[in-house]
Amino acid sequence: MLARARLMFRSTAVRLSALYILLFALCAAFLVFYVTAMSERLLAQQTRQSLQEEVSDIQRAYERGGINLLLRMMERRARQPGANLYVIAGPNGEMLAGNVASVQPGVLDDQGWTDIPFTYEPYAEVDRPGRHLATANVTRLDNGLRVMVGRDLGDPSRFRGIVRRALMVALTIMGVGALVIWFGIGRNALKRIDRMSAASQKIMAGDLSQRLPVGKSGDEFDRLSDSLNAMLGRIEKLNEGLRQVSDNIAHDLKTPLTRLRNKAADALDEDREEVRRVALEGIIGESDQLIRTFNALLMISRVEAGSIAAEMSEVDLSAISADSAELYEPAAEEAGLALTTDLESDLVVNGNRELIGQAIFNLLDNAIKYAVGAPGEAGREAKIGVHLVKRDGTFRLSVCDNGPGVPADKRGEVTKRFFRLDESRSKPGTGLGLSLVEAVMELHGGSLELSATHEDNPEAPGLTVTMVFPEPKP
């Protein structure tokens, strides 16, 4: 329990709450003491003003009726509820009349206001003396008598005590409420942190499929968990891609390296110059293929890392599509394919011209490679289409063919690196073309869609690969 309490007090939220409560308590205490002081000062001013009026009335009564009228007036006022303090003393300071039993020595010696509160003893408490404070005005009459009119200071003291007790009660309630809130919120926060720590331990142990728990409150913990889960998903995807790349490199590059080694060995064992020359040309061809494979891998890595994202500019997607189709038209004719285009004009996107062009080249190269019209399939009408349309706030660039297509259950696999439907690897290629296209589309904030060109033709459904670009904002 103590450890959990220490952990709770290490929480930033709890520390901020404690700081706010402390600041509020200090402000409340300052405000209460300020209000108390101002109230006491106001009461003191009112008391002095009231006493000054009493003194004026007494002086006028003495001037009109002498000592007799003065005594009757003081006696009448002394019997009123909440009466002031009245004392008449002789020239030597001896008390002659009044409603108090005694006053502090020396108070009646000086004329005017008493700057310092003095003590007195009322008649009601002669047998049980206590400390009573008062302030007064002492007036000396022309016959030598001294008249004191004072006021007990118990009311301001009681007011001060009431306010301070109210402050203590308020601070106590606030402290108890803060502890309850700390216990409730802090305990819930600790539970959430424990769940996040448990998930983090599993993630650090190598299970990247784990995700941090996300509640329904939408607070900072949930926002942090969402961000970290998105990051974990990205890391898991990259990790899976790296694992697949490693496996596929070991599998797919082993064969060409073995062929390189065998051809080099045959060239060493061969005495005829022509045969050696043919073997060396084959080695160069295999080497070029390996270089192309590694260049494609490097390009995909650069695109996925976003290292060339700064090279974005306004790109005429219509012009790039037309130029690419025109460039591949001779290759399509040589393969016995008819290449058609249907492109909307003046569609401009924010992107990298070289990467978009390379992605279109990959799609056209795949379409020519796998479309109907290859040797042995010349009886079928072979077509390739390039289409560009604007639809629903997106630019859709599609490359279509009427070849054997890709089964629906394999369309999510063909964008993985080195994945090839031709398991025998009889057709040329590296299995990296669609991986690069997908990486390019992610870099441009778009997506890659695969679908059958002709759903109603099971023999040659074809494949339509669509690059979906978001329409640039004005």
Image: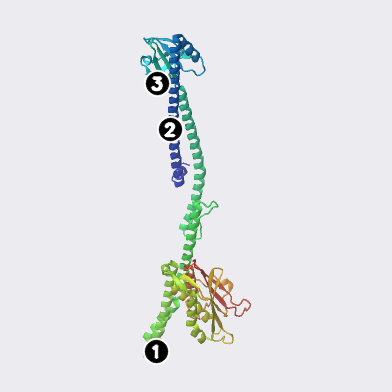
User: Furthest-right residue in view?
Assistant: 456
Query: Looking at the picture, does residue 113 appear above or below residue 210?
Result: above
In the rendered structure, which amino acid carries the disc numbered 3? Pro
User: Between marks 3 and 1, how big is the CA–CA gap?
Assistant: 127 Å
User: Furthest-front residue in view?
Assistant: 64
Q: Which residue is mark 1?
A: 275
- Would you call the spot at circle 2 few (<14 residues within 10 Å), some (14-19), or many (20 or more)? few
Left or right position of 344 against 109:
right
Q: Is any atom of residue 413 visible in this view?
A: no
Q: Nearer the viewer, residue 322 or 345?
A: 345
SS for dot 1: helix
Query: Looking at the picture, does residue 309 appear above or below residue 12?
Result: below
SS for dot 3: loop
Q: Give the image location of residue 175, x and y in percent.
A: 48, 37
Q: Nearer the viewer, mark 2 or mark 1?
A: 2
Q: Nearer the viewer, residue 179 or 118?
A: 118
**Disc assigned to residue 117:** 3
User: Between marks 2 and 1, how big is the CA–CA gap?
Assistant: 108 Å
Q: Nearer the viewer, residue 424 or 100?
A: 100
> Which residue is at 49% across, 37% downward?
174
In the rendered structure, which amino acid carries the disc numbered 2? Tyr
